[in-house]
Amino acid sequence: MDVISFLPPLQAGLNLVATVLIIAAFLFVRKQNTRAHKACMVAALVVSSLFLASYLYYHNQVGYVPFKGEGFIRPVYFTILFSHILLAIVVVPMILVTVGAAIMDKVQLHQRLTHWTLPIWLYVSVTGVVIYLLGFHLYT
């Protein structure tokens, strides 16, 4: 197996791990366990960064990958894909600003930003897995 064919399942796995880490971080902060919250968020940032690097490398090598599904699933897939791409572009600077507020110990700003950043980051991570399953397993 060459490295290129290994990247899509790796990317889906990284998205899944990021989802679990983000949810765990949310639960930890709700229980006021800031140490565990920070550890999960750092891990989520690392995992998401690895995803982004592998994603950019993959599409630089492969280019556009056509979706083979037909009928009703096509508009569903492309709606998910479009929203995923748009929000993925938007969420990167949101994550950086939210993390920056945490690093600078601007707790109130950090909390306000997370009300938007958290659901968007989760949506992008979850839909990344859905896109992979639809494009590489269910409709091949």
Image (tube, rainbow, N blue to C red):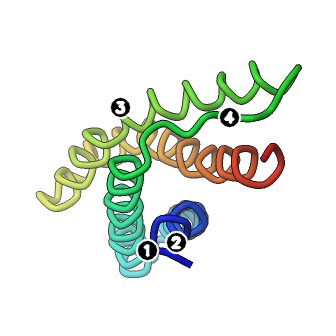
Q: CA distance from mark 1 to mark 2?
A: 9 Å
Q: How many residues crowd mark 3 within 10 Å: few (<14), some (14–19), many (20+)?
A: some
Q: Is residue 135 left or right of residue 52?
A: right
* Residue 77 percent location from the top left of the image: 71, 30
Q: How many residues crowd mark 2 within 10 Å: few (<14), some (14–19), many (20+)?
A: some
Q: Pick the residue in front: 94 or 131.
A: 131
Instruction: Say which amino acid is labelled 3.
Output: Val
Q: Sequence order check: which comes first, mark 1 or mark 2? A: 2
* Residue depicted at 31% across the width and 47% down the height: 95
Instruction: Say which amino acid is labelled 1.
Output: Cys
Foreground tag (2 vs 3): 3
Q: Which residue is mark 4?
A: 67
Q: Pick the residue in front: 112 or 66.
A: 66
* Residue depicted at 31% across the width and 43% down the height: 92
Question: Are the residues tagged 1 and 2 within 8 Å (C-beta)?
Answer: yes
Q: Which residue is mark 3?
A: 90
Q: CA distance from mark 4 to mark 3?
A: 24 Å
* Residue 1 percent location from the top left of the image: 57, 78
